[in-house]
Amino acid sequence: MTVVDVVKGSSPIILGLPHTGTHVPPEIWARLNDNGRLLADTDWFIETLYDGLLADATTVRATFHRYVIDANRDPDGVSLYPGQNTTGLVSTTDFDGQPIWQEGAEPTEADIGQRRATFHAPYHAALQAEIDRVKAIHGVAILYDCHSIRSKIPFLFDGILPDFNIGTDGGRTCAPRIEQAAVEVTAAVAGYTSVLNGRFKGGWTTRHYGRPDTGVHAIQMELAQSTHLATEAPPFAYDAEKATRLRISLKTMLTRIEAIALDLKSQGDQT
């Protein structure tokens, strides 16, 4: 199995999908405990949710599960949210703080180094290559990183998560117009809640690639899974009715962001 699936498009938009993969190599699967083998922290059906929303968008999707190694974490293991509960590059627990590895089979530093080289690095090499290719075409590239998470996880946050969680690292990773478009579209959708740079401010991918002054913009969208799943517990079934409604708003947002990208190109303005 390939580490990363890439679909090349001609749009200035690149959809990053670091957490939809469910592949776990047999030698790693054998070390997971029963809880880990649920793969509960997958971004379930996000690739289905975004499929076909924006014609000619490039997609870069990790095929491996985040329990193998997290493609949205700093390869040096630096925490995204110092002082807060979170999961790491190769996590020892799930989002509820429960162990995912059999006792005595937790990943070693050597394991982490091998997985970084085998999985993490190739994913980001592919993503960087697509950013460079798209920017060469348009003079600008916008990475839209696609994520989802359960709406209630006391270990990570209090209460119920908003439906749309926009992350731009406090406005540092993209032009204000891109951030504003996401805010306006999500705020205008009846029946949904949204927040900008709340609990989720953009992961390592967004923070690493988002350099507006170079023409590369990045924004993360963390969706509450209650927006498109029938249940946020196993078997994590897709709710087509919910998803159809949500896809309308996501398409509106992506289309608007794409138009901004093309305008930024024509004006030679990255802000």
Image: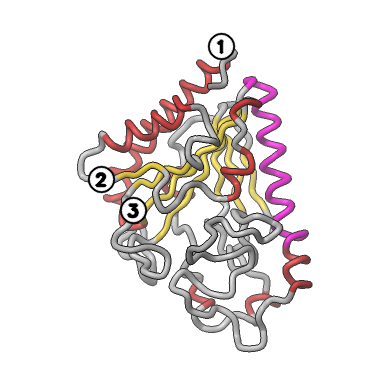
Residue under the image location 47 percent in, 47 percent down: 201
Toward the front, the furthest residue is: 83
At label 2, which amino acid type do we have?
Answer: Tyr
The segment highlighted magenta reads 116-139
Q: Specify the quadrant of the image occupied by residue 133.
A: top right
Secondary structure beneath label 3: loop
Q: How crowded is the residue under tag 1: few (<14 C-alpha within 10 Å), some, or many (20+)?
A: few
Query: Quick check: 258 left or right of 26?
Result: left
Q: Specify the quadrant of the image occupied by residue 114.
A: bottom right
The mark found on residue 192 in the picture is: 2
Between 89 and 144, the one nearer to me in the picture: 89
How many numbered circles does the render carry? 3
Q: Position of residue 161 (x, y in %)?
A: 33, 56
Q: How crowded is the residue under tag 3: few (<14 C-alpha within 10 Å), some, or many (20+)?
A: many
Q: CA distance from mark 3 to mark 2?
A: 12 Å
Q: Earlier in the sequence, mark 3 or mark 1?
A: 3
Q: Tell me the quarter of the image containing the N terminus.
A: bottom right
Residue under the image location 51 percent in, 70 percent down: 39
Q: Label 3: which residue?
A: 228
Residue under the image location 64 percent in, 48 percent down: 5
At label 1, which amino acid type do we have?
Answer: Ser
The mark found on residue 266 in the picture is: 1
Q: Is residue 134 magenta?
A: yes
At label 3, which amino acid type do we have?
Answer: His
From the image, state whether disc 3 or disc 2 is nearer to you.
2
Q: Position of residue 17 (x, y in %)?
A: 55, 49
Q: Earlier in the sequence, mark 1 or mark 2?
A: 2
Secondary structure beneath label 2: loop
From the image, state whether disc 3 or disc 1 is nearer to you.
1
Secondary structure beneath label 1: helix
